[in-house]
Amino acid sequence: MFRSAEKRPPEQKSYIETKIGRLPREWDIARLGDVTEPTAPIRYGVVQIGPDTPDGVPIVPIKHIQRIGDAVLHRASPKIEAKYKNSRVKGGDVLLSVKGTVGEVGVVPDGFEGNIAREIARIRPQASIDQHFLSLQLQAPQTQKRIDNLVVGSTRLEFSIHAVRDFVVAVPPLPEQRKIAEILRTWDEALEKLNALRAAKSRQLDGLAAKLIHDDQVERFHLREFLKESSTRNRDEQVQRVLSVTNSAGFVLAEEQFAHRVASASLSNYKIVRWGQYAYNPSRINVGSIARLDDWGEGALSPMYVVFQVKGGLDADFFGHWLRSAEARQRIALAAQGSVRETVSFGDLGSILVPVPTIERQQAIAKGLNAAQAEINLLDDEIKAVTRQKRGLMQKLLTGEWRVEVDTVEIPTNTKEAEHAG
DNA sequence: TACTACACTGTTCCGAGCAA
DNA sequence: TTGCTCGGAACAGTGTAGTA
């Protein structure tokens, strides 16, 4: 990806201890308040944004802080926004979330004109500071740790605007800032490409699954003929691993989903789910809360879940691919009964018609779709690895531990080294 | 067993009040 | 008056527990 370049050992450079750690002697440290344009001091945004107004001024919320140019933003009426004219943003401003979700960072794209929500602080760097470098410096793992230590509040986390102004960052000479930002941008571009490729592969898989599974020539049968409910209870509490099924990640450990253990004191009434079995929450299945247990041998599930397994005549992988299809989601939604919460009992699920070709055909289809899924899984692994590499590089470059020459880039040829640094 | 009410955590929106 | 902070309300996504 890069031209290899000479790497100079850190001990050959001159370093000094600062209050934010060991830095190269020629680097400065500076309060954010001191590297901000004097005409646009750090401040947060619109307190009460009011109703959405078609011709109003776009207001950037935390959730869109990293994709301001792409997102559809709430627009405040010009009259309301005018009261907060001091927090208007323009291209090149660095934004930092300071309330609720603290530490999210974004850079306002060129040409954008609008304002920010009050959960965001605007930092307009002086000409001596590269905005992309500052953005990266604020995102760096070591900086985020320092921000975490300054955050106050229990129910609602907050990074006080005073603390933001007093927050100290490492500042190399401008050419070095730009070079570091340029290097790390290369990693961002690689991640963007990988994510785009993954999205394309995923769409390809959906299309292939729809084509192979939903064949009008194939006879359909009720799911009840192929599914068997399992209501084994954890009577002697031999299973202590409590699981949940989430919309986004399938089976997860309950303690990872929640900040504390929310399971009942006794797990004796919990249902046991075993490897290869499916489970779903009848009140959430219409939003995707259904999954197959692949990552653990067994687990205990809240009694509200329905646990079942696929039996002979229907290939388990074929069923899994059908379950992810748009048609399956539609049929499950239709099966949901109208009530306060739309629920799908095991009986309702069994009444859904599913196309069932011969078992040999099912296995052949599942094999092809599994291969496509495996490609996506590989891309996921690669995305995780590149993300780790980028974090490692940020750790090294943004502390000056690895130096860059303005003319020649000092990048380790072995990216594993960067990965391990993170 | 199915359904419903309610609890809890985390996030975001926004009204109100305090201090400079 | 303005800047800032506190904290209630609403909402999403998960859970437990009671009752028919």
Image (tube, coloured by chain):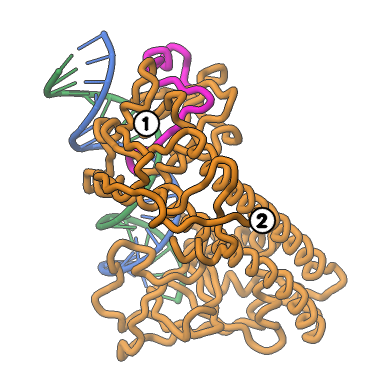
Chain colours: A orange, B green, C blue
Q: Amino acid at mark 1?
A: Ala
Say whether disc 1 or disc 2 marks the residue closer to the N-terminus: 2
Percent coordinates x, y for residue A51 in the rendering: 45, 24
Above or below: residue A230 compared with residue A188? below
Of all chains, the one bearing label 1 is A
Percent coordinates x, y for residue A327 in the rendering: 70, 61
Q: How many marks?
A: 2
Does the image show residue A64?
Answer: no
Residue at left 47%, top 21%? A76
Residue at left 42%, top 43%? A137
| Residue where numbered disc 1 is placed | A121
Q: Is residue A54 left or right of residue A15?
A: right
Percent coordinates x, y for residue A390 in the rendering: 52, 55
* Nearer to me, A55 or B19: B19
Percent coordinates x, y for residue A265 in the rendering: 24, 75
Of all chains, the one bearing label 2 is A
